[in-house]
Image (cartoon, rainbow, N blue to C red):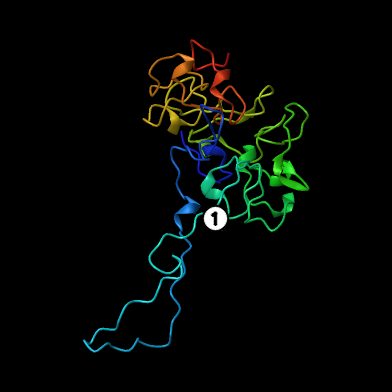
């Protein structure tokens, strides 16, 4: 399966075997990675060509201001030990990342209003105001499935995810529901999937992307049906909350929750 880092796209959110979001350092299909831009600046224009040396050359090139002066790599950013999101998101001039345990230098301030991404809270759709504390955007609001309010890592709470369709997740028809016990999207009524009974996005089934569990039937990518084979859990449409650890999977049938 494959989450996109820092994307609130409903169809690309899932958890890894350790409970983390694969878009935070372990995602399998990371398109549109905002970290690919090195942010380097072009050397300043000095208004003309440098004077030629006696041998007709123009001398040594000027130091590159993006490397500190002599072709060295740019200085690394010290990531706080309390940072829980992908380290490459910290202070990378890629937008304000919230719910990550420490304040991102990209944020204008520590309020929820400054947030642009809330992957640290497993947010799927919705607003960061629903995921992090109003006056401390480093801390996620604990989800309380069943209270009718979509918070934390919940995809929905009571009503189906607003505006979501089965086609958004790769199916061809049917209706998206909301699990009353996990507040994850319920894709069991979606049609046109790879196999009857598969409840996670079709792109996760048998695509050599790792063993996806809790999806209704065993993924062919799994070595066997045991819970110990799981690599990714807590995906959209799975039997567990978004981003859940694989220890909630049935020990002998990893298609189901224990």
* Left or right, 251 with reference to 54: right
* Left or right, 223 with reference to 100: left
User: Residue 233, how many percent across, how many down?
Assistant: 53, 26
Secondary element under disc 1, as helix, strand or loop, is loop
Which residue is at the far left? Answer: 55
* Residue 218 visible in this rendered orientation of the protein: no
Q: Is residue 220 above or below residue 134?
A: above
Nearest to the observer: residue 43 or residue 1:
43
In which image quadrant can residue 133 be found?
top right
What residue is shown at x 64% (from left), y 44% (from top)? 118
User: Residue 184, how many percent across, how many down?
Assistant: 63, 29
Q: Identify the residue position indicated by label 1 in the image.
A: 92
Nearest to the observer: residue 91 or residue 166:
91
Q: Is residue 246 above or below residue 204?
A: above
User: Residue 23, how many percent across, how many down?
Assistant: 51, 40
Local packing at callout 1 (Cα closer than 10 Å; few below 14, some 14-19, many 20+) is some
* Left or right, 71 with reference to 237: left
Q: Is residue 58 above or below residue 202?
A: below
The image shows a total of numbered marks equal to 1
Q: Is residue 78 above or below residue 209?
A: below
Which residue is at the far top? Answer: 252
* Residue 223 visible in this rendered orientation of the protein: yes
């Amino acid at each position: 399966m494959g989450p996109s880092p820092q994307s609130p796209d409903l169809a690309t959110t899932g958890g890894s075997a350790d409970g983390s979001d694969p878009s935070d350092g372990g995602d399998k299909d990371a398109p549109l990675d905002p970290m690919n831009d090195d942010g380097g600046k072009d050397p300043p224009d000095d208004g003309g060509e440098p004077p030629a040396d006696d041998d007709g050359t123009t001398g040594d090139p000027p130091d590159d201001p993006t490397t500190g002066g002599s072709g060295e790599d740019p200085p690394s950013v010290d990531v706080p030990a309390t940072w829980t999101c992908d380290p490459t998101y910290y202070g990378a001039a890629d937008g304000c990342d919230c719910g990550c345990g420490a304040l991102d230098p990209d944020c204008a301030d520590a309020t929820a209003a400054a947030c642009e991404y809330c992957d640290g809270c497993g947010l799927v759709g919705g607003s960061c105001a629903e995921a992090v504390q109003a006056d401390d955007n480093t801390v996620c609001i604990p989800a309380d499935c069943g209270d009718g309010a979509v918070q934390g890592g919940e995809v929905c709470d009571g009503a189906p995810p607003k505006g979501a369709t089965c086609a958004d997740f790769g199916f061809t028809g049917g209706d998206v529901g909301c699990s009353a016990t996990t507040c994850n999207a319920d894709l069991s009524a979606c049609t046109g999937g790879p196999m009857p009974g598969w409840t996670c996005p079709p792109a996760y089934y048998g695509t050599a992307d790792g063993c996806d569990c809790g999806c209704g039937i065993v993924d062919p990518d799994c070595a066997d049906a045991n819970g110990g084979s799981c690599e990714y859990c807590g995906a959209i449409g799975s039997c567990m909350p978004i981003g859940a650890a694989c220890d909630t999977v049935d020990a002998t049938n990893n298609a189901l929750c224990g």
